[in-house]
Image (cartoon, grey):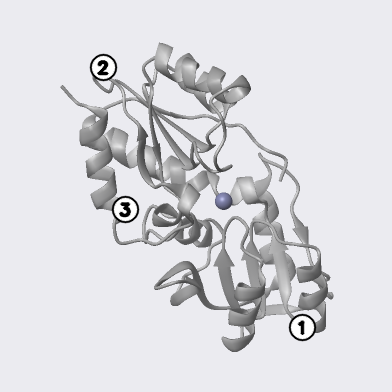
Amino acid sequence: MLTSTAVGAYMDELLATAGTPDYPNALNGLQLENQSAIRGIAAAVDFSTRAVQGAIESSANFLIVHHGMFWGGLTPLSGPTYRILRMLMENDIAVYSSHLPLDRHPTLGNNALLAEQLDLTPSGLFARFENIFIGVRGEADIETASLVNSARVFANDYGEIRTSRILPGRRTKRWAICTGAGASADTLHEASAAGIDTLIVGEGPHWTAIHAEEHDLAIIYAGHYATETIGVRALARHVAEKYELPWTFVSAPTGL
Ligand SMILES: [Zn+2]
């Protein structure tokens, strides 16, 4: 019988979960086990009622998410938290979450795959977190506007993209990617130090757009949700192929 703990252990190995630092609430790995044999995989960006419903509708009993069950911190098991847990238990669904281990994975990760989607070839790593790098960077010689367009096409299914002010004719020569909440004091500092002229992220605070304009940096905010749809899909496909199981992606855009 294919158990959730066996699938979880395989994924931990694949993603180097044990050796990857993360925020405590990420709690990477198998977050909820189940009892029945795994018969189908569902993937979603966020652990949510929509994600669990999507898993149930597709008869999947192993749910893979990027932002897991404990993302929001300590909370009593009452109200919506109780209801979602009950829904999982009644349908015997296991939950596996992978945050930074998935962000940084060289072939299944959000960052490597976003570069591929935008036709960019990484030549190095970016966005240091403790002893690891989450993102990627590289060189190009393209009009920044055309990169913005590629990002718009990529994110189209999930929402609008935004950018800092970009002057006509501006070119991108050194780019970096950090998906999700990728525009921060740390990444902007690192971008300056590495001579990055174009930063592609999911989202960032308002001040980052001003900082960008002042430092002749272009920031493309392609959506926190959109930029993190690709890793969970690739991971679910990989695991489903390994165990010859059906898999599905549950689309539940957050609007951000
Ligand atoms: Zn995220």
Q: Nearer the viewer, mark 3 or mark 1?
A: 3
Task: Give the amino acid at mark 1.
Answer: Asp
Q: Quadrant of residue 236?
A: top left
Q: Is mark 3 within 8 Å of ligand 1?
A: no
Local crowd size for mark 2, using a 10 Å CA cut-off: few (<14), some (14–19), many (≥20) = some
Q: CA distance from mark 2 to mark 1?
A: 55 Å
Q: Which mark is residue 22?
A: none
Which is in the foreground here, disc 2 or disc 1? 2
| Residue at the spot 65% in from the left edge and 36% down from the top edge | 253
Please state, as top left, top right, bottom left or bottom right, where the N terminus lies in the image.
top left
Instruction: Tell which residue pokes out farthest to the front in this image.
Output: 76
Q: Are marks 3 and 1 in contact (CB under 8 Å)?
A: no
Distance between the alpha carbons at the discs numbered 3 and 1: 36 Å
The front one of 117 and 205 is: 205
Q: Secondary structure at mark 2?
A: loop
Q: Are marks 2 and 1 in contact (CB under 8 Å)?
A: no
- Number of other residues with Cα within 10 Å of mark 3, as a class: few under 14, some 14 to 19, many 20 or more: many
Q: Earlier in the sequence, mark 3 or mark 1?
A: 3
In this view, the residue farthest toward the top is 90
User: Which residue is under mark 2?
Assistant: 36
Q: Can you see residue 145? A: yes
Q: Residue at x 51, y 74 (%)?
A: 137
Pointer 3 residue: 15
What residue does disc 1 label?
216
> Please, what secondary structure does the residue beneath circle 3 have?
helix
Name the N-terminal-most of marks 2 and 1.
2
What percent of the width, then of the height, locates residue 100? 44, 56
* Residue 21 rendering spot, x and y as whole percentages: 40, 62
If you read the primary sequence from the N terminus, does the residue marked by circle 3 or circle 2 appear first? 3
Q: Give the amino acid at mark 3.
A: Leu
Q: The residue tagged with tag 1: helix, strand or loop?
A: loop
